[in-house]
Amino acid sequence: MTVKQAYEYSLMELRKHKSPSLHLEDYNYYLNKGIQEYANDRYSLFETSQQLTDDLQPLMTSTLGTILAGNKLQYTGGYVSSVTALDGTVTEKPVDVTTGKRYGSDYYQFPSPKNYWHMTGSHVTTVSLRNHKCTPAGSEINVPSKKLPIAIANGIINNGYLKPDGKRPYHLFTDGGLLSVKPDLIYLIGNSRLNVIKDIHIDYLKEPATLALTVTQRDTPVDTSDTFEFPEYACNEIIKRVVKLILEASSDVRLNTHIPINKTT
């Protein structure tokens, strides 16, 4: 479904309820608010059923972050910072990596991808720097990273079976700073004299795209507006939400009899 089609369907519903006239910029605002509401509702029950997981399939993506010399990380996909050349080629810029110690473990901290919304999984490839137990120096291992609940972090660092190491990395999130609206990612890998991170694979949900209909697109017979990321059944649900938001904003008393938004139970 295109943005123009969604606009026309929304107007049809609003006319049924004799809603006040609607400025295009207001419609664009409520459209994106409706999309975000839909995504938030689905994420709150993400992976509780196949249908709910499928609903967010268009937002699922992944990226690989490779650790470079000089405390840098190079993303592949999921741009954090990029440069566009004159020929249109987009090159990703490495991001800074901060290292230190937290919860009794050495850590790597770096910005999340620019389009990051929610993580769904992560794997870490670590390299052994010396012979340690059954792991010879130079060995690489790729293992899942677990999210570290802050409430039990201090207990984990003193537990020999749970504390972070090269075979049992953890990740958590922290404020990206005043100039960032995205969280920073922190990976704990135990003793960095024994193991270092080679790369990090991140599976995540990207932010829903911001959509807008221009006056020219609205008034031109040929539909050149953007297409929704979501399948048509989801677009119909979003339209219901948009209409509901518009009627709420206009304090329409007929809202109580308006078409209901489907609730997931």
Image (cartoon, rainbow, N blue to C red):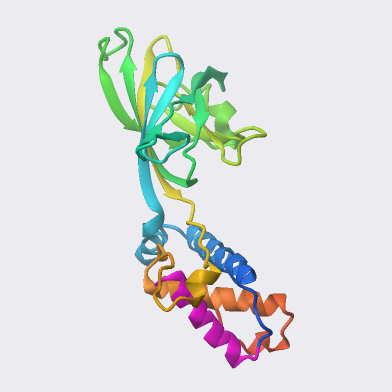
- From the top left corner, tell me how far across and down residue 170 is, in percent: 45, 30
Identity of the residue drawn at 59% across and 64% down? 33
Relative vertical location of residue 249 with respect to residue 77 in this rendering, above or below: below
Q: Please identify the quarter of the rendering in which residue 48 is found.
A: bottom left
User: Magenta stretch: residue 61 in it?
Assistant: no
Left or right? Give the position of 87 relative to 250.
left
Identity of the residue drawn at 44% across and 67% down? 225
- From the top left corner, tell me how far across and down residue 15 is, in percent: 59, 89
- From the top left corner, tell me how far across and down residue 111 is, in percent: 51, 32
Q: Nearer the viewer, residue 89 or 71?
A: 89
**Secondary structure predominantly adopted by residues drawn in magenta:** helix
Q: Nearer the viewer, residue 149 or 111?
A: 111
User: Can see residue 263?
Assistant: no
Relative vertical location of residue 108 with respect to residue 80 in this rendering, above or below: above
Identity of the residue drawn at 41% across and 41% down? 78
Left or right? Give the position of 19 relative to 200.
right
Relative vertical location of residue 221 with respect to residue 110 in this rendering, above or below: below
Relative vertical location of residue 89 with respect to residue 219 in this rendering, above or below: above
What is the tally of numbered marks visible in this picture?
Answer: 0
Identity of the residue drawn at 26% across and 12% down? 138
- From the top left corner, tell me how far across and down residue 243 is, in percent: 59, 78
User: Can see residue 223?
Assistant: yes
Q: Please identify the quarter of the rendering in which residue 241 is found.
A: bottom right
* Position of the N terminus by quadrant: bottom left
Q: Nearer the viewer, residue 112 or 163?
A: 112
Please provide the residue range marked out in magenta: 1-18
Q: Nearer the viewer, residue 251 or 167?
A: 251
